[in-house]
Amino acid sequence: MARLVLKFGGTSVANIDRIRNAARHVKRELDAGHEVAVIVSAMAGVTNSLVDYCRQASNDYDSREYDAVVASGEQVTSGLMAIVLQDMGYKARSWQGWQIPLNTNDVHGAARIQAIDGARLIEAMSGGEVAVVAGFQGIAPGWRIATLGRGGSDTSAVAVAAAIKADRCDIYTDVDGVYTTDPRIVPKARRLEKVAFEEMLEMASLGAKVLQVRSVELAMQYKVRTFVRSSFDDPDKVGVDARGNPPGTLICDEDEIVEAEVVTGIAFSKDEAQISLRRVADKPGVAAAVFGSLAAENINVDMIIQITSPDGSTTDITFTVPAIDHDRAIKVLEQTRGEIGHFGIESSTDVVKVSVIGMGMRSHAGVAAEAFRALASKGINIRAITTSEIKISVLIDAAYTELAVRTLHSAYGLDKH
Ligand code: ADP
Ligand code: ASP
Ligand code: MG
């Protein structure tokens, strides 16, 4: 007997038929004698509608009430999943964040989990009952409902798996694993058998929304055996292999991967904005003033390039900020204009950051040069670049997103044959 966590994302519980299909995956595990906790997302599209209601209600809504509204999507699916399982003859009970309790901090809308008491869930499961947990939500100080940021049910699943010491956490979604890039953009993308935690972390934070970044951090920290797999597989036809692994992609330690490629995947993110400060006086303290003023407003700056004019008197500074912070950043920069003395501010949200990720980059030279060559061959202009040990990111015009992702995917030999 094993203890399993099964998480179903929005498309996997989009209607009652899909919930029934998801419940058949639960049934298979129960019939095999396992204890099961199920984590559910809201039905596809529901969270977006709830967010939209908040925006219609006010331009400046209270984040505690936003959480009260958006957490309700998961409450509905947890109840429906419990009803469907009961209807199939199994014992099942829904659990909201406060009932577990799953405690978070008070950063409403993007709360971090602080503690989960697994005792009640374990007690229910050992009594033969399926614990159906509403993902995405917890309880913040002051007995307020909190949510974990978009895509947060992945994090609920991994965190609950760690708290109840589950043997496995299966993230069921609408693709059958983690691919070399988003299979919706590149049909030639390949499914990966295994992905190292560090690579998955980079892929998720650079735009591959198949897993929420925080869920990967937790899986890495607590060594949760996490698989990404499809809920659309026939529940009666999928079993585990000789090593006990289900179909899908395992997120694991680097040393579990025998044949590592230089490049593992390509990710892209449209959530970026580019800001350029033109003809800024080239003197000490300018960068400190610019980036200090943004930091003071909690605006994260990512890529930065600085180009000094031929006579050395002025410089152009280009950088990126999250697209949602674009307007705030411009306001902050305008306020500090006097102090910095810069001449012009230009900005664009019509940009995309495309990233090449792979642990093999640590020991291989020329990986970045290959990306620049490939993009140049398609006439794609690079606006900014950043690199780290295991990734290279370039900022380009959003219109070239698909072309750039496909070009890089082929250039690194990732296409399926
Ligand atoms: P869920 O609702 O189940 O949480 P998501 O929409 O959050 O599902 O995540 C699954 C989606 O992630 C897929 O449909 C796919 O388009 C997208 N995706 C982006 N990058 C990748 C990748 N590298 N591998 C697999 N899926 C990816
Ligand atoms: N329902 C939430 C969202 O759409 C959480 C999740 O699905 O993971 O962001
Ligand atoms: Mg998701």
Image: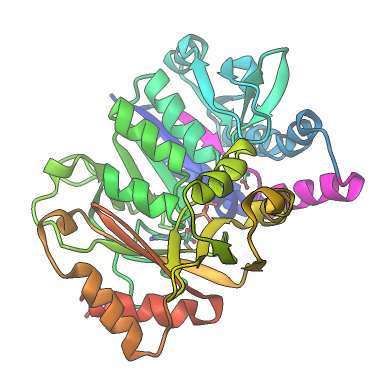
In the image, residue 4 sits, relative to residue 239, either above or below, namely: above
Q: Which residues are magenta?
A: 36-59
Q: Nearer the viewer, residue 248 or 359?
A: 359
Is 20 left, or right, of 211 in this rendering?
right
In the image, residue 97 sits, relative to residue 270, either above or below, namely: above
Q: Nearer the viewer, residue 111 or 86?
A: 111
Residue visible at 74% across and 49% down in the picture: 335
In the image, residue 402 sits, relative to residue 331, either above or below, namely: below
| Image location (x, y in percent) of residue 288 | 51, 44
Quarter of the image for the C terminus: give it: bottom left
Residue visible at 70% across and 56% down in the picture: 330
In the image, residue 417 sits, relative to residue 306, either above or below, namely: below
Which quarter of the figure has residue 327? bottom right
Q: Nearer the viewer, residue 12 or 58?
A: 58
Q: Nearer the viewer, residue 204 or 355?
A: 355
Residue 102 in sight here: yes
| Image location (x, y in percent) of residue 362 | 15, 54
Is 172 left, or right, of 43 in this rendering?
left
| Image location (x, y in percent) of residue 412 | 22, 74
Snapshot colouring: rainbow
Which quarter of the figure has residue 224? top left
**Residue 35 drawn in magenta:** no
Q: Residue furthest right?
A: 57
Is 153 left, or right, of 177 in this rendering?
right
Residue 30 in sight here: no
Residue visible at 54% across and 46% down in the picture: 291
